[in-house]
Image: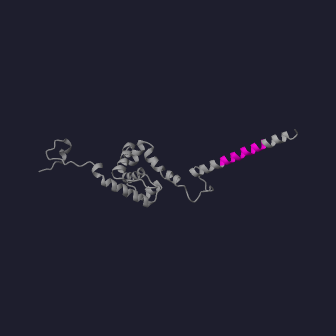
Amino acid sequence: MAHLPLIVQNDRRKRIDLAITIWLQMCTVASWFLVALGAIHSLHTYRPRVRSYILDFYAKRDYVKRLVYASDGTCIEQVRMNRTIFFKLCEMLQTLRELKSSRNMLVDEQVVMFLHIISHHLKNRVIKHHFNRSEETVSRSFHNVLNVVIRLQDVLFKKAEPITANSTDPRWKWFKVLE
């Protein structure tokens, strides 16, 4: 009977040690999770040399999210069309002429780069910085989208209708040929 309190104390000590060990492991896992998400930005933080493809993919799509997915107003300011039209354009380019997602970049990001370049007259160096891509990737995706848009010009662009000399539309009276 004299050993019963000692056994209870040892059992209690083991439970406390186990709880402390579990707590420390949970803190370690949580800190690694925050480091992996990039929430802790310290020069002293260990960063592995090989980064995860999934983390890179979502980090590089951050600028696309801010340009297009934030709001219609932001989308109109940055790519000169609202989100609905943008999504229809992406779908059209993907289905009609098969603009394809690459291993590292989705179709919407390629189209955003293209529209952002032509709507703001930006250089590849600027886009490289904003989208966190290489200049070669920016150039390749720009030309891929451009080639598809050129091939779809009959669908995307309105055909010009010639104005006849006897047109009654008052907007054209200033452009009549003088005889």
Q: Residue furthest bottom?
A: 136
Q: Residue furthest front?
A: 1
Relative to 128, 178 lies left or right: left
Residue 36 percent location from the top left of the image = 58, 52
Relative to 14, 29 lies left or right: left
Residue 61 percent location from the top left of the image = 47, 51
Q: Residue furthest left?
A: 179
Relative to 73, 15 lies left or right: right
Foreground residue, 142 or 76? Answer: 142
Q: Is residue 48 visible?
A: yes
Residue 66 percent location from the top left of the image = 46, 47
Residue at image position (27%, 51%) is 154
The figure's colour scheme reads: one colour
**Looking at the image, residue 21 lies above or below residue 129:** above
Q: Quadrant of residue 136?
A: bottom left
Magenta stretch: includes residue 15 = yes
Q: Which residues are magenta?
A: 12-27
Foreground residue, 156 or 122? Answer: 156
**Looking at the image, residue 41 lies above or below residue 15:** below
